[in-house]
Image (spheres, coloured by chain):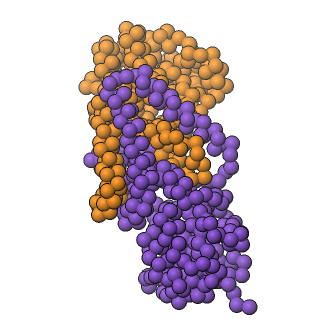
Chain colours: A orange, B purple
Amino acid sequence: MEKKRILVVGLGLIGGSLAMALQGFEDYEVVGAVRSQSTCDKARARHAADRLTFDPAAELPGADVVVLCQDPAGIIGFLSDNRERFKPGALVLDVCGVKTSIMAAAECLPEGVDFIGCHPMAGKEVSGIDNAEGTLFRNTHFIITPGPRATAEHLGLLRRMAGYCRFGDVIETTPERHDEMIAYTSQLMHVIAVSVCDNDELFSCKGFEGGSFRDCTRVAALDAAMWTQLFTFNAPALAKVVGTLENRMRQYREAIEAGDQDALRAMLAQASDRKKQINLERARGDDVRPGF
Amino acid sequence: MEKKRILVVGLGLIGGSLAMALQGFEDYEVVGAVRSQSTCDKARARHAADRLTFDPAAELPGADVVVLCQDPAGIIGFLSDNRERFKPGALVLDVCGVKTSIMAAAECLPEGVDFIGCHPMAGKEVSGIDNAEGTLFRNTHFIITPGPRATAEHLGLLRRMAGYCRFGDVIETTPERHDEMIAYTSQLMHVIAVSVCDNDELFSCKGFEGGSFRDCTRVAALDAAMWTQLFTFNAPALAKVVGTLENRMRQYREAIEAGDQDALRAMLAQASDRKKQINLERARGDDVRPGF
Protein backbone atom coordinates (compact mmCIF):
# COMPACT_ATOMS: atom_id res chain seq x y z
CA MET A 1 0.00 0.00 0.00
CA GLU A 2 1.25 3.45 -0.85
CA LYS A 3 2.19 5.64 2.10
CA LYS A 4 -0.19 8.40 3.10
CA ARG A 5 1.10 11.91 2.61
CA ILE A 6 1.40 15.08 4.72
CA LEU A 7 2.22 18.12 2.61
CA VAL A 8 3.77 21.03 4.54
CA VAL A 9 3.59 24.20 2.44
CA GLY A 10 6.29 26.72 3.41
CA LEU A 11 9.38 25.66 5.35
CA GLY A 12 10.04 28.71 7.47
CA LEU A 13 10.52 28.58 11.24
CA ILE A 14 7.13 27.02 11.99
CA GLY A 15 6.68 24.98 8.79
CA GLY A 16 10.24 23.69 8.92
CA SER A 17 9.91 22.78 12.60
CA LEU A 18 6.57 21.02 11.99
CA ALA A 19 7.96 19.04 9.04
CA MET A 20 10.84 17.93 11.25
CA ALA A 21 8.57 17.10 14.17
CA LEU A 22 6.12 15.13 11.99
CA GLN A 23 8.65 12.83 10.36
CA GLY A 24 7.90 9.23 11.27
CA PHE A 25 4.29 10.00 12.23
CA GLU A 26 2.25 6.82 11.70
CA ASP A 27 2.48 5.70 8.08
CA TYR A 28 2.79 9.17 6.56
CA GLU A 29 5.42 10.53 4.20
CA VAL A 30 6.23 14.19 4.97
CA VAL A 31 6.64 16.33 1.84
CA GLY A 32 7.92 19.88 2.21
CA ALA A 33 7.07 22.55 -0.35
CA VAL A 34 9.60 25.39 -0.73
CA ARG A 35 9.84 28.42 -2.99
CA SER A 36 13.58 29.20 -3.05
CA GLN A 37 16.59 27.07 -3.94
CA SER A 38 18.29 28.35 -0.80
CA THR A 39 15.53 27.04 1.48
CA CYS A 40 15.47 23.81 -0.51
CA ASP A 41 19.22 23.28 0.01
CA LYS A 42 19.01 24.07 3.71
CA ALA A 43 15.94 21.86 4.19
CA ARG A 44 17.71 18.98 2.44
CA ALA A 45 20.88 19.47 4.49
CA ARG A 46 18.82 19.43 7.69
CA HIS A 47 16.59 16.51 6.59
CA ALA A 48 13.60 18.74 7.27
CA ALA A 49 11.24 16.49 5.27
CA ASP A 50 11.17 13.06 3.63
CA ARG A 51 10.90 14.73 0.24
CA LEU A 52 11.01 18.32 -1.07
CA THR A 53 9.12 20.00 -3.89
CA PHE A 54 8.82 23.37 -5.60
CA ASP A 55 5.32 22.54 -6.81
CA PRO A 56 2.83 22.10 -3.97
CA ALA A 57 -0.15 22.27 -6.36
CA ALA A 58 1.03 19.08 -8.06
CA GLU A 59 1.16 17.30 -4.68
CA LEU A 60 -2.32 18.31 -3.57
CA PRO A 61 -4.34 15.55 -5.29
CA GLY A 62 -2.30 12.94 -3.42
CA ALA A 63 -2.03 14.74 -0.06
CA ASP A 64 -4.12 13.35 2.80
CA VAL A 65 -3.08 16.17 5.14
CA VAL A 66 -2.05 19.65 4.01
CA VAL A 67 -0.43 22.04 6.50
CA LEU A 68 -0.33 25.64 5.26
CA CYS A 69 2.60 27.50 6.84
CA GLN A 70 2.73 30.68 4.80
CA ASP A 71 1.81 34.14 6.05
CA PRO A 72 -1.93 34.92 6.25
CA ALA A 73 -2.21 36.44 2.76
CA GLY A 74 -0.21 33.51 1.36
CA ILE A 75 -2.57 31.01 2.98
CA ILE A 76 -5.69 32.83 1.74
CA GLY A 77 -4.26 33.05 -1.80
CA PHE A 78 -3.24 29.39 -1.79
CA LEU A 79 -6.71 28.22 -0.70
CA SER A 80 -8.39 30.30 -3.38
CA ASP A 81 -5.94 29.36 -6.17
CA ASN A 82 -6.00 25.64 -5.43
CA ARG A 83 -9.51 25.01 -4.17
CA GLU A 84 -10.26 22.37 -6.82
CA ARG A 85 -6.97 20.48 -6.40
CA PHE A 86 -7.33 19.24 -2.81
CA LYS A 87 -7.93 15.50 -2.41
CA PRO A 88 -11.52 14.69 -1.43
CA GLY A 89 -11.56 13.74 2.25
CA ALA A 90 -8.30 15.59 2.93
CA LEU A 91 -7.59 17.42 6.19
CA VAL A 92 -6.28 20.94 5.62
CA LEU A 93 -4.71 23.02 8.40
CA ASP A 94 -2.98 26.32 8.74
CA VAL A 95 -0.69 27.51 11.53
CA CYS A 96 -0.88 31.30 11.40
CA GLY A 97 -1.68 33.71 14.20
CA VAL A 98 -5.14 34.90 13.09
CA LYS A 99 -8.09 32.59 12.68
CA THR A 100 -11.34 34.39 11.75
CA SER A 101 -10.11 35.62 8.35
CA ILE A 102 -8.49 32.27 7.57
CA MET A 103 -11.61 30.29 8.49
CA ALA A 104 -13.68 32.61 6.29
CA ALA A 105 -11.27 32.12 3.37
CA ALA A 106 -11.43 28.34 3.83
CA GLU A 107 -15.18 28.45 3.10
CA CYS A 108 -14.17 28.30 -0.58
CA LEU A 109 -13.05 24.66 -0.21
CA PRO A 110 -15.35 22.05 -1.74
CA GLU A 111 -17.51 19.85 0.47
CA GLY A 112 -15.54 16.88 1.75
CA VAL A 113 -12.34 18.83 2.24
CA ASP A 114 -12.05 19.52 5.94
CA PHE A 115 -10.35 22.69 7.19
CA ILE A 116 -9.24 23.16 10.81
CA GLY A 117 -7.54 26.40 11.81
CA CYS A 118 -4.54 25.87 14.09
CA HIS A 119 -2.16 28.08 16.06
CA PRO A 120 0.86 26.49 17.71
CA MET A 121 1.84 28.87 20.53
CA ALA A 122 5.53 28.47 19.85
CA GLY A 123 8.14 30.60 18.15
CA LYS A 124 11.47 32.36 18.39
CA GLU A 125 12.78 35.88 17.85
CA VAL A 126 14.43 34.62 14.67
CA SER A 127 12.80 33.15 11.58
CA GLY A 128 13.49 30.78 8.70
CA ILE A 129 14.50 27.17 8.19
CA ASP A 130 17.91 27.96 9.73
CA ASN A 131 16.21 28.31 13.10
CA ALA A 132 13.68 25.48 12.74
CA GLU A 133 13.82 22.64 15.27
CA GLY A 134 11.78 19.48 15.59
CA THR A 135 11.56 20.12 19.35
CA LEU A 136 10.09 23.63 19.03
CA PHE A 137 6.58 22.62 20.11
CA ARG A 138 7.40 20.51 23.13
CA ASN A 139 5.08 21.29 26.01
CA THR A 140 3.53 24.37 24.36
CA HIS A 141 -0.15 25.07 23.72
CA PHE A 142 -1.74 23.99 20.42
CA ILE A 143 -4.87 26.03 19.74
CA ILE A 144 -7.37 24.69 17.21
CA THR A 145 -10.53 26.27 15.76
CA PRO A 146 -12.46 23.53 13.97
CA GLY A 147 -15.20 24.58 11.56
CA PRO A 148 -18.75 23.14 11.85
CA ARG A 149 -17.94 20.49 9.22
CA ALA A 150 -14.86 19.08 10.99
CA THR A 151 -15.20 15.30 11.32
CA ALA A 152 -14.44 13.33 14.47
CA GLU A 153 -11.97 11.30 12.42
CA HIS A 154 -10.02 14.40 11.39
CA LEU A 155 -10.10 15.85 14.90
CA GLY A 156 -8.72 12.56 16.18
CA LEU A 157 -5.97 12.58 13.53
CA LEU A 158 -5.06 16.18 14.43
CA ARG A 159 -4.81 15.34 18.11
CA ARG A 160 -2.55 12.38 17.33
CA MET A 161 -0.33 14.66 15.24
CA ALA A 162 -0.22 17.18 18.12
CA GLY A 163 0.70 14.41 20.53
CA TYR A 164 3.45 13.18 18.18
CA CYS A 165 4.88 16.73 17.99
CA ARG A 166 4.82 16.72 21.82
CA PHE A 167 2.56 19.74 22.27
CA GLY A 168 1.66 20.20 25.93
CA ASP A 169 -2.07 20.42 25.28
CA VAL A 170 -4.70 21.03 22.61
CA ILE A 171 -7.07 23.94 23.22
CA GLU A 172 -10.24 24.01 21.15
CA THR A 173 -11.99 27.34 20.69
CA THR A 174 -13.83 29.49 18.15
CA PRO A 175 -11.93 31.65 15.63
CA GLU A 176 -13.47 34.79 17.10
CA ARG A 177 -12.49 33.94 20.65
CA HIS A 178 -8.99 32.98 19.49
CA ASP A 179 -8.51 36.34 17.77
CA GLU A 180 -9.84 38.30 20.75
CA MET A 181 -7.49 36.47 23.16
CA ILE A 182 -4.46 36.62 20.88
CA ALA A 183 -4.97 40.36 20.39
CA TYR A 184 -4.48 40.73 24.15
CA THR A 185 -1.87 38.09 24.97
CA SER A 186 0.34 38.26 21.90
CA GLN A 187 -0.31 41.05 19.39
CA LEU A 188 -0.53 43.72 22.11
CA MET A 189 2.85 42.57 23.48
CA HIS A 190 4.32 43.19 20.03
CA VAL A 191 2.74 46.67 19.78
CA ILE A 192 4.22 47.47 23.20
CA ALA A 193 7.67 46.14 22.30
CA VAL A 194 7.96 48.15 19.08
CA SER A 195 6.49 51.27 20.72
CA VAL A 196 9.07 51.10 23.53
CA CYS A 197 11.85 50.82 20.93
CA ASP A 198 10.56 53.99 19.21
CA ASN A 199 12.17 56.17 21.88
CA ASP A 200 15.25 58.32 21.24
CA GLU A 201 16.87 56.94 24.39
CA LEU A 202 17.03 53.38 23.01
CA PHE A 203 20.60 53.86 21.83
CA SER A 204 21.82 55.72 24.89
CA CYS A 205 20.51 53.51 27.69
CA LYS A 206 23.33 50.96 27.76
CA GLY A 207 24.17 50.04 31.33
CA PHE A 208 20.75 51.10 32.58
CA GLU A 209 18.75 48.22 31.14
CA GLY A 210 17.25 45.79 33.57
CA GLY A 211 15.88 42.37 32.74
CA SER A 212 12.41 43.91 32.53
CA PHE A 213 13.55 46.10 29.62
CA ARG A 214 15.07 43.23 27.69
CA ASP A 215 12.06 41.02 28.38
CA CYS A 216 9.56 43.66 27.32
CA THR A 217 11.36 44.57 24.08
CA ARG A 218 12.49 41.04 23.15
CA VAL A 219 9.83 40.50 20.48
CA ALA A 220 10.38 43.90 18.80
CA ALA A 221 12.85 42.38 16.31
CA LEU A 222 9.89 41.17 14.29
CA ASP A 223 9.15 40.50 10.61
CA ALA A 224 7.44 43.79 9.66
CA ALA A 225 5.63 42.41 6.60
CA MET A 226 4.17 39.43 8.43
CA TRP A 227 3.11 41.40 11.49
CA THR A 228 1.50 44.04 9.30
CA GLN A 229 -0.70 41.24 7.99
CA LEU A 230 -1.40 39.76 11.41
CA PHE A 231 -2.36 43.17 12.81
CA THR A 232 -4.48 44.03 9.76
CA PHE A 233 -6.39 40.74 9.76
CA ASN A 234 -7.22 41.26 13.43
CA ALA A 235 -7.68 45.02 13.39
CA PRO A 236 -10.88 45.47 15.46
CA ALA A 237 -9.83 43.20 18.34
CA LEU A 238 -6.30 44.60 18.39
CA ALA A 239 -7.36 48.25 18.22
CA LYS A 240 -9.65 47.60 21.18
CA VAL A 241 -6.95 46.20 23.48
CA VAL A 242 -4.44 48.87 22.44
CA GLY A 243 -7.05 51.52 23.29
CA THR A 244 -7.72 49.92 26.69
CA LEU A 245 -3.99 49.95 27.46
CA GLU A 246 -3.59 53.57 26.33
CA ASN A 247 -6.41 54.61 28.69
CA ARG A 248 -4.91 52.78 31.63
CA MET A 249 -1.44 54.25 30.99
CA ARG A 250 -2.99 57.71 30.76
CA GLN A 251 -4.60 57.15 34.19
CA TYR A 252 -1.23 56.15 35.65
CA ARG A 253 0.42 59.18 34.03
CA GLU A 254 -2.22 61.55 35.38
CA ALA A 255 -1.84 60.17 38.91
CA ILE A 256 1.96 60.51 38.62
CA GLU A 257 1.72 64.08 37.30
CA ALA A 258 -0.77 65.06 40.00
CA GLY A 259 1.47 63.54 42.70
CA ASP A 260 -1.64 61.65 43.84
CA GLN A 261 0.08 59.00 45.91
CA ASP A 262 -3.16 57.53 47.28
CA ALA A 263 -4.55 56.95 43.80
CA LEU A 264 -1.24 55.57 42.57
CA ARG A 265 -0.87 53.21 45.51
CA ALA A 266 -4.45 51.95 45.05
CA MET A 267 -3.94 51.35 41.31
CA LEU A 268 -0.60 49.61 41.84
CA ALA A 269 -1.97 47.48 44.67
CA GLN A 270 -4.92 46.36 42.55
CA ALA A 271 -2.80 45.41 39.55
CA SER A 272 -0.09 43.69 41.58
CA ASP A 273 -2.74 41.72 43.49
CA ARG A 274 -4.19 40.57 40.18
CA LYS A 275 -0.76 39.50 38.96
CA LYS A 276 0.03 37.69 42.21
CA GLN A 277 -3.30 35.84 41.94
CA ILE A 278 -2.52 34.78 38.36
CA ASN A 279 0.95 33.63 39.42
CA LEU A 280 -0.65 31.44 42.09
CA GLU A 281 -3.19 30.02 39.64
CA ARG A 282 -0.46 29.21 37.12
CA ALA A 283 1.76 27.65 39.80
CA ARG A 284 -1.12 25.39 40.84
CA GLY A 285 -2.03 24.56 37.25
CA ASP A 286 -0.40 22.57 34.53
CA ASP A 287 3.21 22.97 33.50
CA VAL A 288 2.69 23.72 29.83
CA ARG A 289 5.37 26.23 29.04
CA PRO A 290 4.56 29.57 27.46
CA GLY A 291 5.23 29.75 23.75
CA PHE A 292 6.27 32.90 22.00
CA MET B 1 43.32 47.12 66.05
CA GLU B 2 39.57 47.14 66.07
CA LYS B 3 37.88 45.98 62.88
CA LYS B 4 36.35 48.60 60.62
CA ARG B 5 32.60 48.49 60.30
CA ILE B 6 30.05 48.41 57.48
CA LEU B 7 26.51 49.09 58.71
CA VAL B 8 23.76 47.85 56.38
CA VAL B 9 20.45 49.47 57.35
CA GLY B 10 17.46 47.39 56.30
CA LEU B 11 17.82 43.68 55.49
CA GLY B 12 15.25 43.24 52.73
CA LEU B 13 16.03 41.63 49.39
CA ILE B 14 18.75 44.12 48.42
CA GLY B 15 20.08 44.95 51.89
CA GLY B 16 20.10 41.30 52.92
CA SER B 17 21.85 40.27 49.72
CA LEU B 18 24.44 43.07 50.08
CA ALA B 19 25.15 42.15 53.71
CA MET B 20 25.69 38.54 52.61
CA ALA B 21 27.85 39.54 49.63
CA LEU B 22 30.00 41.92 51.72
CA GLN B 23 30.91 39.49 54.48
CA GLY B 24 34.67 38.96 54.52
CA PHE B 25 35.37 42.18 52.63
CA GLU B 26 38.86 43.38 53.62
CA ASP B 27 39.01 43.97 57.38
CA TYR B 28 35.39 45.04 57.82
CA GLU B 29 32.77 43.69 60.17
CA VAL B 30 29.31 43.67 58.54
CA VAL B 31 26.53 44.80 60.92
CA GLY B 32 22.93 44.44 59.78
CA ALA B 33 20.20 46.69 61.19
CA VAL B 34 16.68 45.23 61.26
CA ARG B 35 13.33 46.47 62.51
CA SER B 36 11.37 43.27 63.17
CA GLN B 37 12.12 40.21 65.28
CA SER B 38 11.05 38.05 62.36
CA THR B 39 13.67 39.55 60.01
CA CYS B 40 16.23 39.35 62.81
CA ASP B 41 15.56 35.63 63.30
CA LYS B 42 15.72 34.92 59.58
CA ALA B 43 18.87 37.00 59.12
CA ARG B 44 20.53 35.15 61.97
CA ALA B 45 19.50 31.75 60.62
CA ARG B 46 20.88 32.66 57.20
CA HIS B 47 24.07 34.27 58.62
CA ALA B 48 23.16 37.41 56.67
CA ALA B 49 25.59 39.57 58.68
CA ASP B 50 28.40 39.23 61.20
CA ARG B 51 26.25 40.94 63.81
CA LEU B 52 22.63 42.18 63.97
CA THR B 53 21.11 45.19 65.72
CA PHE B 54 17.73 46.86 66.21
CA ASP B 55 19.42 50.23 66.85
CA PRO B 56 21.25 51.55 63.77
CA ALA B 57 21.58 55.03 65.30
CA ALA B 58 23.73 53.60 68.10
CA GLU B 59 26.06 52.01 65.51
CA LEU B 60 26.54 55.16 63.42
CA PRO B 61 29.38 56.79 65.40
CA GLY B 62 31.50 53.66 64.86
CA ALA B 63 30.48 52.90 61.27
CA ASP B 64 33.06 53.61 58.56
CA VAL B 65 30.63 52.68 55.79
CA VAL B 66 26.84 52.99 56.04
CA VAL B 67 24.65 51.38 53.36
CA LEU B 68 21.05 52.62 53.46
CA CYS B 69 18.72 49.94 52.08
CA GLN B 70 15.29 51.26 53.05
CA ASP B 71 12.70 52.64 50.67
CA PRO B 72 13.26 56.22 49.43
CA ALA B 73 11.21 57.90 52.15
CA GLY B 74 12.93 55.73 54.75
CA ILE B 75 16.36 56.76 53.48
CA ILE B 76 15.46 60.45 53.43
CA GLY B 77 14.01 60.26 56.95
CA PHE B 78 17.05 58.36 58.25
CA LEU B 79 19.50 60.91 56.84
CA SER B 80 17.60 63.80 58.36
CA ASP B 81 17.03 62.14 61.76
CA ASN B 82 20.64 61.00 62.16
CA ARG B 83 22.66 63.68 60.40
CA GLU B 84 24.74 64.46 63.49
CA ARG B 85 25.46 60.83 64.38
CA PHE B 86 27.52 59.75 61.33
CA LYS B 87 31.24 59.21 61.95
CA PRO B 88 33.41 62.00 60.53
CA GLY B 89 35.06 60.70 57.35
CA ALA B 90 32.42 57.99 56.87
CA LEU B 91 31.21 56.84 53.45
CA VAL B 92 27.42 56.73 53.23
CA LEU B 93 25.58 55.00 50.37
CA ASP B 94 22.03 54.19 49.45
CA VAL B 95 20.78 51.57 46.99
CA CYS B 96 17.34 52.77 45.95
CA GLY B 97 16.02 53.30 42.44
CA VAL B 98 15.84 57.12 42.39
CA LYS B 99 18.84 59.34 42.82
CA THR B 100 18.06 63.07 42.43
CA SER B 101 15.78 63.28 45.49
CA ILE B 102 18.15 61.16 47.56
CA MET B 103 21.22 63.22 46.62
CA ALA B 104 19.30 66.38 47.53
CA ALA B 105 18.31 64.91 50.90
CA ALA B 106 21.95 63.94 51.57
CA GLU B 107 22.93 67.61 51.40
CA CYS B 108 21.95 67.74 55.08
CA LEU B 109 25.01 65.67 56.07
CA PRO B 110 27.84 67.55 57.77
CA GLU B 111 31.05 68.28 55.89
CA GLY B 112 33.41 65.32 56.01
CA VAL B 113 30.64 62.74 55.68
CA ASP B 114 30.70 61.56 52.09
CA PHE B 115 27.50 60.45 50.37
CA ILE B 116 27.47 58.48 47.10
CA GLY B 117 24.15 57.46 45.56
CA CYS B 118 24.13 53.89 44.26
CA HIS B 119 21.74 51.70 42.31
CA PRO B 120 22.54 48.02 41.90
CA MET B 121 20.65 46.91 38.76
CA ALA B 122 19.64 43.62 40.32
CA GLY B 123 16.46 42.28 41.82
CA LYS B 124 13.79 39.63 41.82
CA GLU B 125 10.02 39.50 41.56
CA VAL B 126 9.94 38.63 45.25
CA SER B 127 11.16 40.64 48.20
CA GLY B 128 12.47 40.27 51.73
CA ILE B 129 15.32 38.54 53.52
CA ASP B 130 13.81 35.16 52.58
CA ASN B 131 14.79 35.77 48.99
CA ALA B 132 18.14 37.47 49.60
CA GLU B 133 21.25 35.85 48.13
CA GLY B 134 24.90 36.79 48.31
CA THR B 135 25.20 36.05 44.59
CA LEU B 136 22.39 38.41 43.51
CA PHE B 137 24.72 41.06 42.06
CA ARG B 138 27.03 38.85 40.05
CA ASN B 139 27.72 40.30 36.64
CA THR B 140 25.05 43.03 36.91
CA HIS B 141 25.50 46.79 36.50
CA PHE B 142 26.29 48.95 39.55
CA ILE B 143 25.33 52.56 38.90
CA ILE B 144 26.83 55.26 41.11
CA THR B 145 26.11 59.00 41.30
CA PRO B 146 28.89 60.61 43.36
CA GLY B 147 28.32 64.13 44.66
CA PRO B 148 30.88 66.88 44.06
CA ARG B 149 32.47 66.23 47.47
CA ALA B 150 33.12 62.51 46.91
CA THR B 151 36.76 61.73 47.67
CA ALA B 152 39.01 59.55 45.50
CA GLU B 153 39.60 57.38 48.55
CA HIS B 154 35.88 56.72 48.99
CA LEU B 155 35.35 56.14 45.28
CA GLY B 156 38.18 53.60 45.36
CA LEU B 157 36.68 51.88 48.41
CA LEU B 158 33.27 51.74 46.72
CA ARG B 159 34.77 50.18 43.58
CA ARG B 160 36.57 47.56 45.68
CA MET B 161 33.27 46.76 47.44
CA ALA B 162 31.55 46.45 44.03
CA GLY B 163 34.30 44.15 42.81
CA TYR B 164 34.01 42.02 45.96
CA CYS B 165 30.23 41.70 45.40
CA ARG B 166 31.09 40.61 41.84
CA PHE B 167 29.18 43.34 40.03
CA GLY B 168 29.85 43.19 36.27
CA ASP B 169 30.72 46.86 36.01
CA VAL B 170 30.47 50.23 37.76
CA ILE B 171 28.72 53.00 35.81
CA GLU B 172 29.26 56.54 37.03
CA THR B 173 26.69 59.16 36.07
CA THR B 174 24.77 62.17 37.40
CA PRO B 175 21.63 61.75 39.52
CA GLU B 176 19.57 63.56 36.87
CA ARG B 177 20.78 61.34 34.04
CA HIS B 178 20.24 58.24 36.17
CA ASP B 179 16.64 59.20 36.87
CA GLU B 180 15.92 60.01 33.23
CA MET B 181 17.35 56.68 32.04
CA ILE B 182 15.71 54.62 34.77
CA ALA B 183 12.33 56.21 34.00
CA TYR B 184 12.65 54.72 30.51
CA THR B 185 14.39 51.41 31.10
CA SER B 186 12.84 50.33 34.38
CA GLN B 187 9.94 52.41 35.73
CA LEU B 188 8.16 52.49 32.36
CA MET B 189 8.39 48.68 32.17
CA HIS B 190 6.58 48.52 35.52
CA VAL B 191 3.86 50.95 34.36
CA ILE B 192 3.38 48.77 31.27
CA ALA B 193 3.27 45.53 33.26
CA VAL B 194 0.63 46.75 35.71
CA SER B 195 -1.40 48.41 32.95
CA VAL B 196 -1.49 45.16 30.94
CA CYS B 197 -2.71 43.32 34.04
CA ASP B 198 -5.57 45.83 34.41
CA ASN B 199 -7.52 44.12 31.62
CA ASP B 200 -10.64 42.05 32.25
CA GLU B 201 -9.23 39.26 30.08
CA LEU B 202 -6.32 38.60 32.46
CA PHE B 203 -8.21 35.80 34.19
CA SER B 204 -9.64 34.24 31.05
CA CYS B 205 -6.56 34.03 28.83
CA LYS B 206 -5.14 30.76 30.15
CA GLY B 207 -3.79 28.69 27.27
CA PHE B 208 -3.37 31.73 25.06
CA GLU B 209 -0.38 33.24 26.82
CA GLY B 210 2.88 33.26 24.96
CA GLY B 211 6.29 33.89 26.46
CA SER B 212 5.98 37.53 25.44
CA PHE B 213 2.96 37.93 27.75
CA ARG B 214 4.66 36.36 30.74
CA ASP B 215 7.84 38.34 30.10
CA CYS B 216 6.00 41.65 29.75
CA THR B 217 3.86 41.19 32.88
CA ARG B 218 6.53 39.52 35.03
CA VAL B 219 7.32 42.63 37.08
CA ALA B 220 3.66 43.50 37.76
CA ALA B 221 3.69 41.59 41.07
CA LEU B 222 5.35 44.60 42.67
CA ASP B 223 5.41 46.19 46.12
CA ALA B 224 2.75 48.90 45.65
CA ALA B 225 3.95 51.12 48.51
CA MET B 226 7.57 51.14 47.38
CA TRP B 227 6.79 51.72 43.71
CA THR B 228 4.41 54.54 44.62
CA GLN B 229 7.43 56.22 46.22
CA LEU B 230 9.76 55.45 43.31
CA PHE B 231 7.24 56.82 40.78
CA THR B 232 6.50 59.89 42.89
CA PHE B 233 10.15 60.79 43.48
CA ASN B 234 10.76 60.59 39.72
CA ALA B 235 7.44 62.01 38.53
CA PRO B 236 8.54 64.44 35.77
CA ALA B 237 10.90 62.02 33.99
CA LEU B 238 8.45 59.13 34.31
CA ALA B 239 5.42 61.11 33.14
CA LYS B 240 7.41 62.16 30.09
CA VAL B 241 8.30 58.63 28.94
CA VAL B 242 4.80 57.32 29.67
CA GLY B 243 3.42 60.15 27.51
CA THR B 244 5.85 59.33 24.69
CA LEU B 245 4.75 55.70 24.78
CA GLU B 246 1.05 56.62 24.84
CA ASN B 247 1.55 58.75 21.72
CA ARG B 248 3.37 56.01 19.87
CA MET B 249 0.74 53.42 20.79
CA ARG B 250 -1.98 55.81 19.61
CA GLN B 251 -0.20 56.10 16.25
CA TYR B 252 -0.07 52.31 15.92
CA ARG B 253 -3.76 52.07 16.88
CA GLU B 254 -4.76 54.70 14.36
CA ALA B 255 -2.85 52.95 11.56
CA ILE B 256 -4.48 49.64 12.56
CA GLU B 257 -7.96 51.18 12.67
CA ALA B 258 -7.46 52.92 9.33
CA GLY B 259 -6.22 49.69 7.74
CA ASP B 260 -3.20 51.70 6.57
CA GLN B 261 -0.87 48.80 5.82
CA ASP B 262 1.85 50.98 4.28
CA ALA B 263 2.06 53.16 7.39
CA LEU B 264 1.96 50.12 9.67
CA ARG B 265 4.68 48.29 7.73
CA ALA B 266 6.90 51.38 7.76
CA MET B 267 6.46 51.88 11.51
CA LEU B 268 7.07 48.20 12.27
CA ALA B 269 10.10 48.05 9.97
CA GLN B 270 11.64 51.11 11.61
CA ALA B 271 11.16 49.80 15.16
CA SER B 272 12.29 46.26 14.37
CA ASP B 273 15.40 47.60 12.61
CA ARG B 274 16.19 49.63 15.73
CA LYS B 275 15.77 46.57 17.91
CA LYS B 276 17.89 44.39 15.62
CA GLN B 277 20.63 47.04 15.69
CA ILE B 278 20.56 47.13 19.50
CA ASN B 279 20.70 43.34 19.63
CA LEU B 280 23.83 43.42 17.44
CA GLU B 281 25.44 46.11 19.60
CA ARG B 282 24.72 44.17 22.75
CA ALA B 283 25.99 40.93 21.22
CA ARG B 284 29.26 42.66 20.32
CA GLY B 285 29.54 44.36 23.68
CA ASP B 286 30.25 43.15 27.15
CA ASP B 287 28.44 40.27 28.75
CA VAL B 288 27.13 42.04 31.83
CA ARG B 289 23.76 40.46 32.39
CA PRO B 290 20.64 42.57 32.71
CA GLY B 291 19.47 43.09 36.25
CA PHE B 292 15.85 43.48 37.19
Q: Residue furthest right?
A: B1
Work out whether B7 lies above or below B207. Answer: below
Residue B106: tell me if it is visible.
yes
> Would residue A127 appear left or right of B216 to someone viewing this image?
right
Percent coordinates x, y for residue B286 in the rendering? 68, 49
| B245 vs B198, nearest the viewer | B245
Work out whether B291 lies above or below A232. Answer: below
| A23 vs B141, nearest the viewer | B141
Q: Quadrant of the N terminus of chain B?
A: bottom right
Percent coordinates x, y for residue B252 in the rendering? 38, 32
Percent coordinates x, y for residue A103 in the rendering? 32, 23
| A36 vs B115, nearest the viewer | B115
Q: Going 63% across and 27% down the picture, which residue do you hit?
A: A47
Q: Going 30% across and 39% down the picture, which residue do you hit?
A: A243
State which quadrant residue B178 falls in. Answer: bottom right
Residue B140: tell me if it is visible.
no
Percent coordinates x, y for residue B133 in the rendering? 57, 69
Q: Going 55% across and 18% down the picture, which residue do you hit?
A: A34
**Total labels drawn:** 0
Work out whether B124 lies above or below A189. Answer: below
Work out whether B200 lies above or below A241. Answer: below
Q: Going 35% across and 56% down the picture, which residue do you hit?
A: A256
| A93 vs A267, nearest the viewer | A267
